[in-house]
């Protein structure tokens, strides 16, 4: 976590014993910190404070929008991309089973081009009068490729079709103007910007009604019951206020340049696309990504072989497979995320570790280096 986020969390945890829904002085103090954080986050992303619903993270925020919309609409089609985070694809899959298809539901997954970007025209071509929900991420969590959400959101607004933008990966790494995006729902998460894990938000456009999925005490304007995590939310606001990825893109680019110099046959995915500043996904042909990951782990590097939320699986990345990458190459993929705490030397050291790991694994397999 960022130092500012840790400080805000500890201060709130120590000094705010009250429930923010209580009317006594301790409750009012907690409520004040909660609402100040809401206003701070809203100002940073150009949203109305009252539109922000705090959640346990991006997964809950995505599910609130997906399930909330689809449970209150008649059967129709859902349009999304083939590269969405599992927090979107998995809840949508529930409307793509035999029973839902028999009832009239269908799920349309739009594939990206080989640069990792889904074209706006391809999304719009799948939207019609029977579309009940459109889901599209702002930036891909594996390749970092930025998606054309604004054009699709504008079309959906004109047609009166609800749209969810999963902005978890883009928050803090690119300009985010929720009002300008025009989507009905925008999902956010704190830990991607150096905030605490287990805190997020769903931004709901004014006038949009969602059924409460877990009824209780009616917190968050009766949209998400449960006592709010005031220390976590205060830390979320502090992290967003102090987040700075301005130097990360140059660091990532330097790493990729060194990688290609040392391992010329490495392939960097979404190389030609506009990407968020911190993400690099690449493959070293002939090596299994999980095996390479373990070698790097032993060398002290924390990298992933796909999405951090599903990297325990042995399956190749669904993002790369949807881009048309061959299975063998997709299985060799490694994802690296740089942050404000990294230095250029970290990238150089990682490349050196990759070179050593490749030589070691090739020698073990009896292959020529």
Image (spheres, helix red, strand yellow):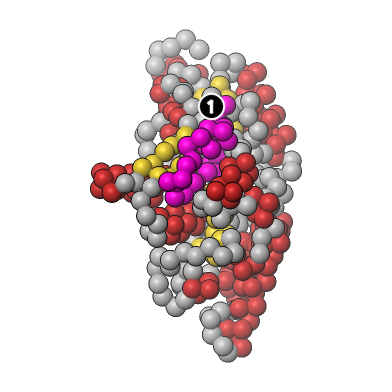
Q: Nearer the viewer, residue 65 or 157?
A: 157
User: Is 40 contained in the magenta span?
Assistant: no
Q: Residues within 10 Å of mark 1 (few under 14, many from 20)?
A: few
Residue 299 in view (yes/no): no
Quadrant holding the N terminus: bottom right
Quarter of the image holding residue 9?
bottom right
Question: Farthest residue in the front direction?
Answer: 129
Q: Secondary structure at mark 1?
A: loop
Which residue is painted at 67% across and 39% down in the image? 277
Residue 130 x, y percent position in the rendering: 42, 46
Report the side of 40 relative to 126 (left or right): right
Q: Is residue 160 above or below residue 367?
A: below
Quarter of the image holding residue 331?
top left
The residue that label 1 is drawn on is 113
Question: Farthest residue in the top direction?
Answer: 368
Residue 81 x, y percent position in the rendering: 48, 38
Which residue is painted at 61% across and 84% down in the image? 28
Give the magenta range.
115-141
Q: Nearer the viewer, residue 291 or 120?
A: 120
Which residue is painted at 73% across and 34% down in the image? 250
Residue 50 in view (yes/no): yes
User: Is 138 contained in the magenta span?
Assistant: yes
Q: Is residue 155 above or below residue 200?
A: above
Give the mark count: 1
Q: Is residue 225 above or below residue 362?
A: below
Residue 326 x, y percent position in the rendering: 43, 21
Q: Is residue 7 above or below residue 129?
A: below
Residue 257 x, y percent position in the rendering: 67, 24
Which residue is painted at 66% across and 24% down in the image? 258
């Amino acid at each position: 976590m960022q130092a500012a986020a840790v400080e805000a969390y500890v201060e709130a945890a120590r000094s705010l014993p009250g429930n923010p829904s209580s009317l006594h002085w301790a409750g009012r103090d907690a409520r004040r910190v909660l609402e100040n954080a809401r206003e701070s986050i809203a100002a940073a992303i150009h949203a109305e404070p009252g539109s922000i619903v705090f959640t346990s993270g991006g997964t809950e925020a995505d599910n609130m929008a997906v399930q909330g919309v689809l449970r209150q609409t008649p059967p129709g089609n859902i349009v999304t991309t083939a590269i969405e985070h599992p927090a979107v694809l998995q809840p949508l899959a529930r409307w793509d089973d035999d029973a839902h298809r028999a009832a009239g539901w269908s799920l349309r997954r739009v594939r990206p081009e080989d640069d990792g970007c889904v074209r706006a025209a391809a999304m719009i071509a799948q939207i019609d009068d029977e579309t009940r929900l459109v889901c599209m991420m702002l930036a891909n969590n594996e390749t970092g490729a930025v998606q054309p959400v604004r054009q699709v959101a504008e079309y959906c607004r004109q047609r009166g079709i609800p749209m969810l933008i999963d902005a978890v990966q883009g928050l803090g790494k690119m300009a985010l103007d929720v009002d300008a995006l025009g989507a009905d729902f925008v999902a956010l998460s704190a830990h991607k910007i150096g905030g605490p894990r287990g805190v997020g938000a769903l931004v709901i456009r004014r006038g949009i009604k969602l059924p409460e999925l877990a009824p209780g005490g009616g917190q968050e304007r009766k949209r998400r019951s449960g006592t709010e995590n005031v220390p976590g939310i205060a830390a979320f606001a502090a992290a967003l206020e102090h987040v700075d990825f301005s130097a990360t893109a140059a660091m990532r680019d330097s790493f990729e340049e060194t990688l290609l110099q040392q391992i010329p046959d490495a392939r960097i995915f979404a190389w030609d696309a506009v990407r968020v500043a911190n993400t690099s996904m690449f493959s070293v042909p002939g090596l299994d990504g999980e095996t390479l990951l373990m070698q790097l782990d032993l060398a002290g590097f924390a990298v992933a072989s796909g999405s951090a939320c599903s990297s325990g699986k042995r399956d190749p990345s669904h993002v790369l497979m949807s881009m048309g990458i061959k299975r063998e190459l997709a299985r060799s993929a490694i994802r690296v995320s740089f942050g404000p705490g990294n230095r250029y030397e970290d990238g150089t050291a990682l490349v050196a570790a990759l070179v050593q790991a490749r030589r070691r694994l090739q020698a073990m397999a009896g292959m020529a280096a």
